[in-house]
Image (spheres, rainbow, N blue to C red):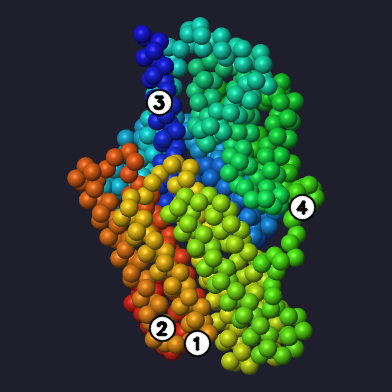
Amino acid sequence: MKELQVIVAFSGFIALLLWGVHMVQTGVQRAFGKNLGLWMGRAMGSLPRAFGTGLLVTAAIQSSTATGLMIAGFAMDGLVSLTPGLAAMLGANVGTTLIVQALSFNPTMLAPGLILIGVWMFRHYEPGRTRDLGRAFIGLGLLLLSLHELVNMFEPLKSAPMLGTALDALGDAPVLALLASTALTWASHSSVAVVVLIMSLAHHGLADPALAYTLVLGANLGTAINPVLEGGRDDNPASRRLPMGNLGTRIIGCLLGMALLPWAPDIMQTLGSDPAHEVANFHLIFNLIVAACFMPVLRPYARLLQRLMPQRSNPDDPARPRYLDESAREVPAVALGQVAREALRLTDLLRESLQLTQRALLQDDTQAIGRARYLNGVIGELDQSVTTYLATMDQESLSPDDEQYLKAILTFSMNISHAASVSGMGLLGHASRLHKKHWVLGAEQKAELSDTLDRLQNNLRQAASLFVSGDRQVARNLAFEKEYFRTLEAKAADRHLERIKTGRIDVADVGAFYLEVLRDTGGVNAYLVNAAAYPILARHGELLPNRLRETD
């Protein structure tokens, strides 16, 4: 009976540790997710910047798996090329070690204060960034508490014969230990939680240094599996280059780590006296060495991946520009007219993508998710083609009116591409989550969401028409559509809060998830307004209230 109580308690604290990590991740992602993703997509121009971006984002959300899926999504959408994407993944692998380093100093005394502050922020603020950060603080406090309890639990387990036998068996079979840790990390989606568990085992002498380091290698390998399984699901081999490339660096690193493992304990002892610190240091140094080895050879490594997983060519590829005629550059008016036609193609593609997204959210059509992601990638590639074409035009041959038209086209194309990015990272991500969790929206939510997505597509048609006509009244009407989406989100938030207050919420309730969906529809609409309405109103000297001019 006592053994059963120990097993239940141990499992409960492991679950609390995983839940704390999950709350930190989701809290930060909800608070900064959209802006974080867009910033991340723009901040990877060079390899050092890409490495630093991956490191910082992962240090913030504490999930190299989540960062890997995000970068893989950018690569699929054509927003990030392969070489900086691989550099960002190396940075993400280093970033996930930072919280492990912090936890190795056992800052348990901070836990009650973090939970207190987090609960206060969560209870006293409306749904938004402050409330989401409160959620992250609560998760961090729970993580620290669960870690403290696990450390205490392992003390009496030192003499447990069954645990000792199991760990001795793993110590005698390092490959089996590596695979077991890999599977545990893959299943938990958190290398942080697994490495923290290994630190606890090492701290109490339940795992000798060689076994602990082997388990750490497995945790590093397991965290690279989910991006492979969850990213690159279409039939194009090129979409799997980035996650497979990251997995390749992990496999090579683990093979080298296993070969050098006999010398690791002596080296780690010179860096720290406590076994938990030694595990954390090994985790950090392993990822730094892998990054240092691969950063200089990323370009040839990327070329190898491109050879092994070639781009599937398609003569009817919609990503190929149709109207960007190089010979038209000699006549700026003709060239601008052609590039404007290409920019309008983006709205047709985005409309089809939004229709597929609507099917994915309301009809649980998983095939629609892959097709919509592909179209969002096409939009990103076409926007890049439009931008390059405009940037390489002879500026000296443009009249003032031509310059103004060029800026209008550039603004329109860029904002339509951003709308596709928000739809891909937000709405399609929600559709995947809805399918994965087997959640079901209520009838009222489905009806409201259907009307909202229909309205969003109508606003897209208005933006395309406005880009051609320049009608000021239509521009005003489109600009005030932001108020509709804000009101819609506020009403849904009030309904959700009322359900919480009256106790009418159960395990299957998806009210918070539904709020995130509505928030991202508002984000897509904001870029549609920015694409066509605001440039026209600004051109005529019309100013709108700040609350409408803010980008959602």
Measured Cα–Cα span from mark 3 to mark 1 = 62 Å
Does the CB distance between marks 3 and 2 fall below 8 Å? no
Numbered badge on residue 206? none
Where residue 359 sits: x, y (%)?
Answer: 48, 57
Camera-side residue: 506 or 402? 506
Whether residue 337 appears in this view of the structure is yes
Numbered badge on residue 310? 4
Q: Please state, as top left, top right, bottom left or bottom right, where the C terminus lies in the image.
A: bottom left
Whether residue 271 appears in this view of the structure is no
Residue type indicated by callout 4:
Pro
Measured Cα–Cα span from mark 4 to mark 3 = 46 Å
Earlier residue among tags 4 and 3: 3
Q: To which residue does mark 1 refer?
A: 469
Say whether residue 394 is left or right of residue 69: right
Determine the residue located farthest toward the left in the rendered image.
502
Report which quarter residue 518 is drawn in: bottom left
Q: Is residue 459 above or below residue 98?
A: below
Label 3 environment density (alpha carbons within 10 Å; few <14, some 14–19, many ≥20): many
Identify the element where label 2 is drawn.
helix
Label 4 environment density (alpha carbons within 10 Å; few <14, some 14–19, many ≥20): some
Label 2 environment density (alpha carbons within 10 Å; few <14, some 14–19, many ≥20): some
Earlier residue among tags 1 and 2: 1
Q: To which residue does mark 3 refer?
A: 13
Label 1 environment density (alpha carbons within 10 Å; few <14, some 14–19, many ≥20): few
Where residue 490 sits: x, y (%)?
Answer: 29, 61
Residue type indicated by callout 2:
Val
Q: To which residue does mark 2 refer?
A: 474
